[in-house]
Image (spheres, grey):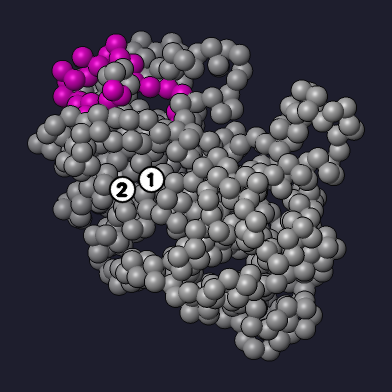
Amino acid sequence: MAKEGHKYIFVIGGVMSGVGKGVVTSSMGLILQSKGYPVNLVKIDPYLNVDAGTMNPTEHGETFVLKSGLETDQDMGNYERFLGRDLTNDDYMTSGMVYQTVIERERALKYGGKCVEAIPHVRDEIVRRIEAAASYNGSRLSVIEIGGTVGDFQNALFMEAARFMKMQYPDDVLFVMVSYLPVPSTIGEMKSKPTQNAVRDLNSYGIQPDFLIARAPYPLDDKRKEKLAVACSVRADHVISAPDIKSIYDAPLNFEKDQLGDMLLGALKLPVRKASGLAGWKKFVDRIASSKKEVKIAIVGKYFDTGDYVLSDAYLSVIEALKFSAASLGVKAAITWVNAKNFETGKMKVSELGKYDGILVPGGFGESGIEGKIKAIEFARTKKIPYFGLCYGMQLLTVEYARNVAGMKGANTTEIDAKTPYPIVAVMEDQKEKIARGKMGGSMRLGTYPAYLKKGTIARAAYKAEMVQERHRHRYEINNHYIPELEKAGLVFSGTSPDKQLMEIAELPKSVHPFMLGTQFHPELQARPLTPHPLFTEFLKAALAGKR
């Protein structure tokens, strides 16, 4: 259980999803942390999936893997990036997790023969998890984001848990609603009625918001603030304007200008403190704003198809990692999305990649777009354009090299072609039984593992270390049977597991190519605004050196 007097701030969405609850939660966490308060952030996702690992990235966005290996929502990535530290399993919750725990407890007769019901048993499990996260983290404040929006049927029990906690700890719980105020183009006026209705929906759960974060295309005027204050029973100075901004990393600085942190602390009856820990953050934001020179990067992926729109969230951590390293170099990463399928259909010529300074192939699964990615990798290798492959991007780098340099015609990954004459990439031994049993969720090689780096390689020079810890999410690996042939043909496996059984990094020597490197792990998951990932930085350095 949490300590007596622990403070809780619930962040709830109104009107529509995707308006920035995760950024608001991250920003509040950063601000309160910068004022010297130990903070933990919790994400609640209302879906029945036990974790985020089995969901389609074009529908839900990327899966963010924690150090422990738990597959979570992409908001957990924002939390880690803003707080600058690793989060734990206790900081994430889904309806699936909650129901699974309650049902397992019932099956084990832990309820003493009682009729197990949504209230109180499911509600109490939600409360237990929120309090356990606070206790485990040893924090003073918890900021809890409830996914989705008010009124979503699947959110009802989480709202009830939040209301119940307010009833238990009336002086220790705050509610913040993040809502959207549209400006219809045909009207030209900011409309507050959708937010008024959202607050009314929230009231129906027995919850009254203490703060409104008013997301809108433009800053909120005083008239709108006063109207919301009267209609929603919220103090006018607790209606915080949150207009569209160029970078999400501006958000905490903007909120601090409006003294949101001090108002939250005042409402929780905690001492107000100066945000002395934001200096480094401000320098980072200033570097982003002042960077004029561009480095052009093509991300050749496949998870872009969502109707007529491009869903860049499928590769969110990759994008942010590029931004962090670019800012550290005083440049801006100009990213272009390239659908690998277009190279297969002829809709786009692979030679069009020649206008970019660097090419990156991120992770993925399945057959779709794979031959297009291999064409892009071959182009990067032969034209000596810096190339960075992540997970599948490393596996396909190896397949392309085997086919076109090592003379292994028809080489492939068994994920695509089980009958390939050269299974360069094959399913991991410990995964075969899991696949045969249909045990797919949460069963890949997940979480942090060590890798040892060879001297005299790009990887070793970038990390400036002999051993590193990186996060994984994969089911296939480079087939060790073909390592001698590949190395003889010139490919260098510069990073391996401690027992040398797993190839973690593949690269070409600098004497052959300015930067041709792939990682079996996902380095983007550990990139932070104030501590960019060294491999992303090295990739952009090479791209700048050969800038077109």
Q: Which of 353 and 516 lies nearest the eye of the viewer? A: 516
Question: Which residue corresponds to mark 2?
Answer: 533
Number of labelled discs?
Answer: 2
Whether residue 151 can be seen here? yes
Q: Amino acid at mark 1?
A: Gln
Stretch in magenta: 473-498
Displayed quadrant of residue 386: top left
Q: Secondary structure at mark 1?
A: helix
- CB contact under 8 Å: marks 1 and 2: yes
Residue 264, given in percent of the width and then of the height, sits at 60, 72
In this rendering, the answer to whether 24 lies above or below 352 is below
| Residue drawn at (45%, 38%) of the image | 67
| Residue drawn at (29%, 18%) of the image | 499
* Quadrant containing the C terminus in the rendered view: bottom left
Sort mark 2 into few (<14), some (14-19) or many (20+) by Cα contacts within 10 Å: many
The disc at residue 526 is 1
